[in-house]
Image (tube, rainbow, N blue to C red):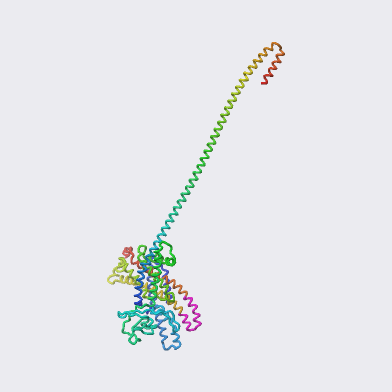
Amino acid sequence: MQLVTPGIGLIFWMLVSFSLVLYVLGKYAWKPIMKGIHQREDSIEKALEAANDAKKEMLQLKAGNEQLLRDAKDERDALMRDARKVKEAILDEARVKANEEAGRIMENARENIQYEKMAAINDLKNQIASISIEIAEKLIGKELENKKQQHELTEKLLKDVKIN
Amino acid sequence: MNREIISLNLSNIAFKFENRLMIRKLLHTARLQVVLFALLLSGFTYGNTASHDTITSPSVPAHEQTEKKAFDAGKMIIDHIVDAHEWHILTYNDFHLSIPLPVILLDNGKLVSFSSGHFHHGHEAYRGYRLMMEGEYEGKIVKTLEDGETIDASAKLPLDFSITKNVLSLFISVLLLCIIFISIGNKYNKNPNTAPKGLQSLLEPLIIFVRDDIAIPGLGKKNYARFMPFLLTVFWFIFLNNLLGLVPIFPGGANLTGNIAITMVLALFTFAITTFNGNKSYWKHIVNAPGVPWWLKIPIPLMPIVEIVGVITKPFVLMVRLFANMTAGHIILLGFMSLIFIFGNMNIVAGYGVSIFSIAFGVFMSLLELLVAFIQAYVFALLSSIYFGMAMEEHEHTEEHTTEH
């Protein structure tokens, strides 16, 4: 029955030692340990939260960057489109202008030609008139001399005319 | 006997104490365990005395008598699991190697102290005291008459405050606990917010385990912090001593947590804390349980009596469970070892043959005991936390009771 009879000595020493160990560990071990664990858990939780926030921010930043890139691309495309339009417009304008210029030059040339032509015709008319008069003068002069000679002279004069 | 206790003990593991129903169930099994153990224990002691009788019986032939005396398994086992006034290490033929421990007696208000070596393992009396090795006062120090031999039957037994094997083991474990945990506590103070290192990282998961799986489920997040020191101390005290008990030689080997005095004090602490923290509704449920018909309270206070018995049963169960589990484990292990010598006494070859199986089972049991060492510490701390939680619980289902009846 020694097994199931608690001894007074052991009870006494156990009461003393356990109370002591409870007090000592409670004050010098469990308090700092629990505090330390709690603090660390808090700091880990905060760090995790911060990391999560940073991740979210990163995602947002990335999305922003992408948006920026897309915008830039769009702008570039728009610019290119505009440039192309401007180029085409310039080209068209140039073409129109060139055509106009060419037209004008042609017109001028035509006018000049007409003018020159008119001048030449006038000149020719004048010459023909003078020649005709000369011929007529000569014809009138010769007619009186000889019929045959008259013919010959006319022939000869006509040859002169052809030269012109 | 032991197998049943072990199986009961293993059945405890299965419980995840989620709700009140489960706790009631557990308490029920625990009560069953007590009854079973008491029954089995009486059987064991009966068997022991019976074998003792056969040794001294004159009808047994002389040579068998000496052989039997050479090895008595029951006595050996009991000697190993109970307290002693010396720390026995080994015996080889007539040579005894043991550490004598101080004897401190309080005899009629007089403090007497001397080394237990003077008793010569109970063979001699010293200064009018004698250490009894058998009989009614087995293991106790009694007063002798003037001749120094016969027991003074008229004198009261002196109060024994000796530093026995268990007391020394208790001091060693308390010292170890202080050294280990204060050094760890200093580490937390010195480098806060860093990853745990070395011993700290080994023990921290278990400290967190006590907090997250013992204290918080039992007490709730609001109240748990106040009880952490007690729960941690109890858990580590039991766990460390269970492990030390498994070490076969000094400074381990004392069956400290398998001693009823130790478990009694631990359970008393739980009981005291439960009682001092009981709130109004806890006491109301004991004295005047709401929702119970009046004729169960007046004129015979049946329900209050039942409730009070329940209050006392809780720590009693804690005490017996730890004691029985640890003692049973030691008994089984020693039993396996005894088999070798029992068979060896019959036939030397049989002894060697059995030793193979005994050692194999011994190793198995030791491994199982490692598990039990942890589980018992866990269960004790968990039940303590649940009891505290029950004492502090605010009962919201009072109305439910009244509407039911």
Residue B25's quadrant in the figure? bottom left
Question: Would you say residue A152 sits in the magenta stretch?
Answer: no
Q: Residue furthest top?
A: A144
Residue B94's quadrant in the figure? bottom left
Quadrant housing the N terminus of chain B: bottom left
Judging depth in this view, the residue of A26 and B261 nearest the camera is: A26
Where does the image place residue B276, in percent across and percent down from the top left? 31, 68
Where does the image place residue A110, in percent across and percent down from the top left? 59, 26
Judging depth in this view, the residue of B231 and A47 nearest the camera is: A47
Judging depth in this view, the residue of A145 and B101 nearest the camera is: B101
Residue B27's quadrant in the figure? bottom left
Where does the image place residue A67, in percent across and percent down from the top left? 47, 48
Question: Would you say residue B360 sits in the magenta stretch?
Answer: yes
Confirm whether residue B33 shows in the render: no
Magenta part of the chain: B338-362
Quadrant housing the C terminus of chain B: bottom left
The secondary structure making up most of the magenta span is: helix
Q: Residue furthest left?
A: B299
Confirm whether residue A81 shows in the render: yes
Q: Residue furthest front?
A: B190
Where does the image place residue A45, in percent across and percent down from the top left? 41, 59
Count of labels in the image: 0
